[in-house]
Image (spheres, grey):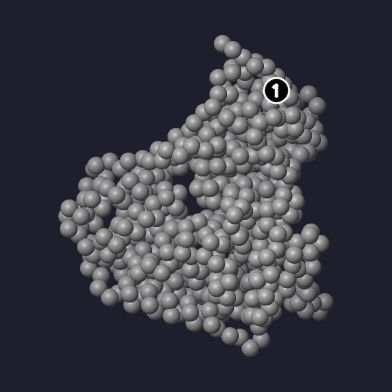
Amino acid sequence: MKTIKLTMGQALLKFLDNQYIEFDGHENKFVKGVFAIFGHGVVVGFGEALEQYKGDMVVYQGKNEQGMAHAAIGYAKQKNRREIIACTSSIGPGALNMVTAAGTATVNRIPLLLLPGDTFACRQPDPVLQQLENQSSVSITSNDAFKPVSRYWDRVVRPEQLMTAMMNAMRVLTDPADTGAVTICLPQDVEAESYDYPVEFFAKRVHYITRRLPAKGEIDRATEKIKVKKKPLIICGGGVVYSEAGDTLLNFAEEFNIPLGETQAGKGAIPWDHRLNLGGIGVTGGLAANKIASEADLVIAVGTRLSDFTTASKWLFKNPNVEFLSINVNSFDAYKMNSMTIVADAQETLNALRDALKEAEYISLYTEEIAVAKEEWDGEVNRLFEEKKENGLSQARVLGEIAKIIGQDAIIVGSSGSLPGDLQRVWRPVKPKTYHMEYGFSCMGYEVCAALGVKMAQPDKEVYSMVGDGSYLMLHSELVTSIQEGYKINVVLFDNSGFGCIENLQNSQGIPSFATQFKFRDPKTMRLTGRDMPISYAECAKGYGAKTYTVRTIEELKNAFASAKQQQVSTLIDIKVLPKTMTGGYGAWWRVGVPEVSENPNVVKAYESFKTEVRKTKQF
């Protein structure tokens, strides 16, 4: 057996540089580079390998470990999970900063390879700088925190263990049903230890993503289920996007006159103006989809996790005869809502179902309901876009103006706060992959950092990060990296002086505004109820080297976006929007933990309403 002597760090890099993906006959390199923030736990071992390497791997300098990992998630998501950028960090705080990103990737089923440095496997110098000493077991380190948020976790304590660790890592990263965060911990002494690795370990390896075919029995049972239903509804989830099944789903819907609603991950797979597309569904959905959903007797869930926002906490579907059919490559997701399951690829399943239903001459019994619901909702969105406020700009109107300006090819990126709700309701994408929303984890700080990853994935597109001031303050580190690397992103910052989305939730349950507005402390009450904090986000970003704008009027908005389009450097547009101008209340309910006992009569009233709605929900 021919071998080559390498350190574990060198072998890891050489292995990563020879991994490929093939999907539908198209082959591409899987690992395109490495985000790194070097510390003592990684700079000497794996860092030396990166510095010396002569292959194609590009090293990007992150500015915050969580931020660079969010950028990697944004990249992989925009690439339909078929290319990734790995992330490496030091031990201790550097590694722990990536735990949140690991959760974001795993919840959203996005491949993310994390390579945190670790303490010494030999333990001789323990405790080293930044080492977490767990007195119940010295084998536990900070990196054990990744276990619950990783789809696969391993620690390489001998250099030869790298081979089994990385084969398992690739197994998970390239599996559409099982993908998420993969954490391979690198003890800093083992990174530098050498081993005679078999040359075949570094041979080009192609990972084939095959379309899982539905079983005949699954198709037969589903066909019989659909045939007896009069008013089915399709939920278009992110699995439709990753399967590249948008056209197939649309043909299926047209053939049998079945309307569809979109999840955050599925939005954009079907043009918004198609007659059967009712738009967003659920808590952050619109009136059209939610109205039809309440009457549907069958819900066909395609590639969706059926989260509480999609199902309105299992409250949305009111027809007493409603049943669920779930098409998903992941059996865990397919079994939700007591569904009949087809565990298979979306495109293959829809094609097979279409053939069977055509043979049965099936057609839904919808008449004018779809068109009426869609026309009503489109009118409401147009009203929101034209809504004028005497004392400032409403958030919905700003979104309407932005949609007119940026063009159909531009990509918007979002994640948290009130913007995802408004965007799912009123944003009108025509082309696939122009609506990039992380809403499985709704992770504050994702928006700006992921926008960098999206721009790296599609450098020819204009990329706009839709972010609130609260989330921007949480994390925007990779704005600096975008300037450093020359990847222009546009940060569209909606400044409503606080955590507006959560304040609205707070108020809706009878609780007065408390610690959700950005105000100075009142010395008399000792509460944060003083004057507003006058923060200029434009001035802050200007110091990074971004081109910046401050917007208070529609005219200033138009001028800012026109100028931003012409810039070669990243931009930030600081838009001062009125608080409490988010959209909401379109035929959905969301279950939250309302206090059962309170001295506040408004909270007591909210709890009584809560009990009423709970009785209307499905239990599993």
Identify the image quadrant of residue 148. top right
Residue located beneath label 1 in the image:
7
Residue 138, position in %: x, y? 71, 30
Q: Is residue 223 above or below residue 184?
A: below
Residue 257 relative to residue 141: left or right: left
Residue 41, position in %: x, y? 76, 34
Q: Foreground: 495 or 470?
A: 495
The residue tagged with tag 1: helix, strand or loop?
strand
Residue 217 relative to residue 568: left or right: left
Residue 472 relative to residue 533: left or right: left
Q: Residue at x 57, y 30 (%)?
A: 18
- The quarter of the picture where the N terminus appears is top right
Residue 470, position in %: x, y? 68, 65
Query: Which amino acid does the dot numbered 1 rest on?
Result: Thr
Q: Residue at x 52, y 80 (%)?
A: 384
Q: Residue at x 59, y 17 (%)?
A: 198
Residue 604 relative to residue 586: left or right: right
Q: Residue at x 54, y 58 (%)?
A: 436
